[in-house]
Image: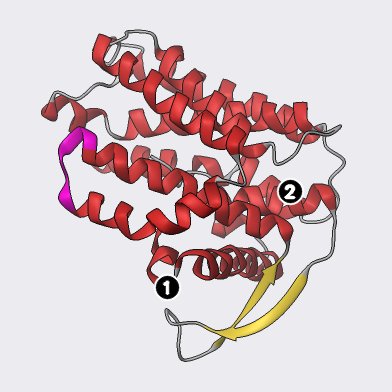
């Protein structure tokens, strides 16, 4: 479900793209140090965004390195690491672990269970540090399963549950910025859920899986309503973002907030136009 909160490469300056990649690699290295090489394949763009957002907000010490990577052995990669890339890596682990278990419960996918087992030791150690966030994840999955079982027609219900989850993930610590970070996370979470549901509509229809858009997809104004809902979620997240006193990394963050999150939507529209 995750991975929608990314950059718009065409609208990002070269130096900012290089810096974005350095943050991505930094979260990736932190994930490797916690869980091993294979865990790096689970890294999502959403958590890279979170690392950059928190770095821009808190402006603490940051370490820059040039390292060789198993995935790109022919060259050295610039890496940015700090307390917030480490936090983003930890959140990535918590979310992916529970997502893998959820796939096992839903589909009895043995491969996903095996992946979860491989991460279990690292997960347990990491989970001890973040009881609030773990509680939010487990509560979210329980409530989401109940909504899916009831085939809830409310578009806002399941999206709101994802928003509540991401609000707690975005809030690294309780301080003067907690409310704004939770606001951004809440609406980013809703956007992610709704964009994912929109993306998967036909697949879910064929499989008979739950998707709140199924109940309005036959209406003439379906596409317009989806765009309106997604725009509202993005606008509310952006409003929370603009309240924060961020100067560092602001060009990258605005690229993501105002353009990058729409990349997958535009790709889907282009495919429809081609058909």
Disc 2: which residue: 54
Q: Is residue 53 magenta?
A: no
162 in relation to 120, above or below: above
192 in relation to 94, above or below: above
Front-lying residue, 275 or 215: 215
* SS type, badge 2: helix
Residue 257: horizontal and vertical position, in percent? 64, 41
Q: In which quarter of the image is residue 16?
A: bottom right
Q: Quadrant of residue 64?
A: bottom right
- Location of the N terminus (image quadrant): top left
Residue 162: horizontal and vertical position, in percent? 48, 27
Asked if residue 201 can be seen in this view, the reply is yes
- Location of the C terminus (image quadrant): top left
Front-lying residue, 86 or 192: 86
Category of crowding for the residue at label 2, using alpha-carbon neighbours closer than 10 angstroms: few (below 14), some (14–19), many (at least 20)? many
Disc 1: which residue: 37
Please report the residue visible at 79 percent of the width from the left and 52 percent of the height from the top. Answer: 56
204 in relation to 78, above or below: above
Which of pointers 1 and 2 indicates the residue nearer the eye?
1
Category of crowding for the residue at label 1, using alpha-carbon neighbours closer than 10 angstroms: few (below 14), some (14–19), many (at least 20)? some
* 95 left or right of 102 in image: right
* SS type, badge 1: helix
Asked if residue 273 can be seen in this view, the reply is no
132 in relation to 14, above or below: above
Residue 146: horizontal and vertical position, in percent? 32, 15
- The magenta span reads 105-110
């Amino acid at each position: 479900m995750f991975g929608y909160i990314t950059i718009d490469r065409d609208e990002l300056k070269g130096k900012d793209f290089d810096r974005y990649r350095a943050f991505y690699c930094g979260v990736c290295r932190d994930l490797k140090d916690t869980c091993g090489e294979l865990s790096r394949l689970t890294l999502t763009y959403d958590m890279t965004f979170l690392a950059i957002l928190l770095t821009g907000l808190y402006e603490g010490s940051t370490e820059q390195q040039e390292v060789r990577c198993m995935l790109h052995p022919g060259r050295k990669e610039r890496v940015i690491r700090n307390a917030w890339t480490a936090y983003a890596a930890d959140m990535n682990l918590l979310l992916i672990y529970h997502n893998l278990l959820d796939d096992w419960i839903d589909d009895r996918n043995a491969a996903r269970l095996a992946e979860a087992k491989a991460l279990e030791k690292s997960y347990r150690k990491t989970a001890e540090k973040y009881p609030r966030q773990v509680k939010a994840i487990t509560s979210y999955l329980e409530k989401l399963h109940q909504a899916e079982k009831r085939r809830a027609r409310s578009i806002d219900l399941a999206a709101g549950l994802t928003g509540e989850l991401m609000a707690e993930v975005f809030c690294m610590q309780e301080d003067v910025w907690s409310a704004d970070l939770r606001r951004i996370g809440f609406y980013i979470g809703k956007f992610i859920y709704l964009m994912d549901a929109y993306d998967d509509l036909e697949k879910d229809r064929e499989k008979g899986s739950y998707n709140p858009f199924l109940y309005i997809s036959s209406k003439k104004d379906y596409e317009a309503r989806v765009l309106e809902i997604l725009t509202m979620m993005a606008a509310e997240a952006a409003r929370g973002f603009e309240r924060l006193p961020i100067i560092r990394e602001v060009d990258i963050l605005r690229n993501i907030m105002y353009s990058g999150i729409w990349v997958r939507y535009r790709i889907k529209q282009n495919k429809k136009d081609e058909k």
